[in-house]
Image (spheres, rainbow, N blue to C red):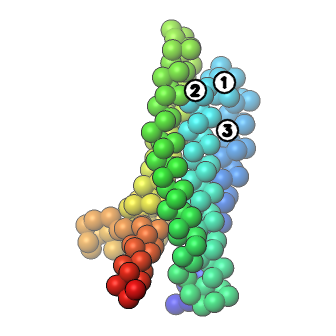
């Protein structure tokens, strides 16, 4: 069981880290191959892309710490300090998500009437970043193994994300310490 969880956590952190790195190369290649998209000239592209990269970095760190802790300490529970940091960062993520539509508005008015197609790509990246945010901080949206898919079929509802469970664990620990003190 422990080895299966170690493999899963390794898969998650390496997948997030690989995506983090590959998206940089893919964006460069797309911008290079299709200069008419004006991707690198769009505020909306950069803000959406950096949000996505920031979220992937958070996911990479979260899964890596859980993997490392299980490997060394025989527990996959995220340390309280990390949970507190991610809870604080969650507020920044929300603020950034709320602000990004202003970048789309600025791009639209700056480029209008010849709005580049890169704006559509930036919108897809923005939507993907929001889905990543939801997947990490609220509801598990990624079901990439048989166990997850069977669980989804059986319950007919999405699972709570691991990080969301950790936030609840932190809240319960605080409540317990208040009751004891």
- Residue 51 is left or right of residue 94, and the answer is right
Q: Mark 2 and 1 residues: CB-CB less than 8 Å, in contact? A: yes
Mark 2 and mark 3: Cα distance apart in space: 11 Å
Q: Nearer the viewer, residue 56 or 150?
A: 56
- The residue labelled by disc 2 is 118
Q: In the rendered view, does 166 fall on the left or right side of 27?
A: left
Secondary structure at numbered mark 1: helix
Q: Earlier in the sequence, mark 2 or mark 1?
A: 1
Read off the residue under disc 1. 41
Residue designated by label 3:
27
Question: Residue at point 56% right, 64% down?
Answer: 85
Q: Nearer the viewer, residue 99 or 35?
A: 99
The answer to the question of whether label 1 and label 3 lie on touching residues, with beta carbons closer than 8 A, is no
- For residue 79, what is the image quadrant? bottom right
Instruction: List x then y, in percent, for residue 63.
Output: 59, 70
Cα gap from disc 2 to disc 1, whole angstroms: 9 Å
In the rendered image of this protein, does residue 12 appear above or below residue 2? above
Nearer to me, 8 or 137: 137
x, y percent for residue 139 = 38, 61
Image coordinates for residue 74, horizontal then vertical, percent: 60, 91
Residue 95 percent across, percent down from the top left: 48, 44
The quadrant holding residue 26 is: top right
* Extreme-top residue of the structure: 113
Q: Secondary structure at mark 3?
A: helix
Q: Is residue 29 above or below residue 153?
A: above
């Amino acid at each position: 069981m422990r080895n299966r969880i170690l493999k899963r956590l390794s898969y998650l952190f390496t997948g997030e880290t690989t995506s983090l790195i590959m998206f940089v190369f893919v964006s460069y290649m797309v911008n290079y191959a299709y200069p008419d998209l004006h991707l690198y000239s769009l505020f909306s592209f950069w803000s959406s892309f950096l949000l996505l990269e920031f979220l992937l970095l958070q996911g990479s760190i979260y899964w890596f710490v859980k993997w490392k802790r299980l490997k060394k300490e025989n527990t996959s529970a995220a340390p309280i300090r990390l949970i507190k940091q991610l809870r604080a960062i969650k507020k920044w993520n929300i603020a950034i998500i709320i602000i990004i539509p202003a970048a789309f508005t600025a791009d639209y008015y700056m480029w209008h009437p010849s709005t580049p197609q890169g704006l559509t790509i930036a919108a897809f990246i923005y939507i993907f970043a929001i889905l990543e945010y939801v997947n990490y901080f609220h509801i598990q949206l990624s079901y990439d193994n048989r166990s997850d898919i069977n669980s989804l079929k059986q319950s007919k509802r999405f699972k709570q994300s691991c990080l969301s469970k950790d936030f609840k664990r932190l809240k319960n620990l605080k409540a317990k310490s208040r009751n004891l003190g």
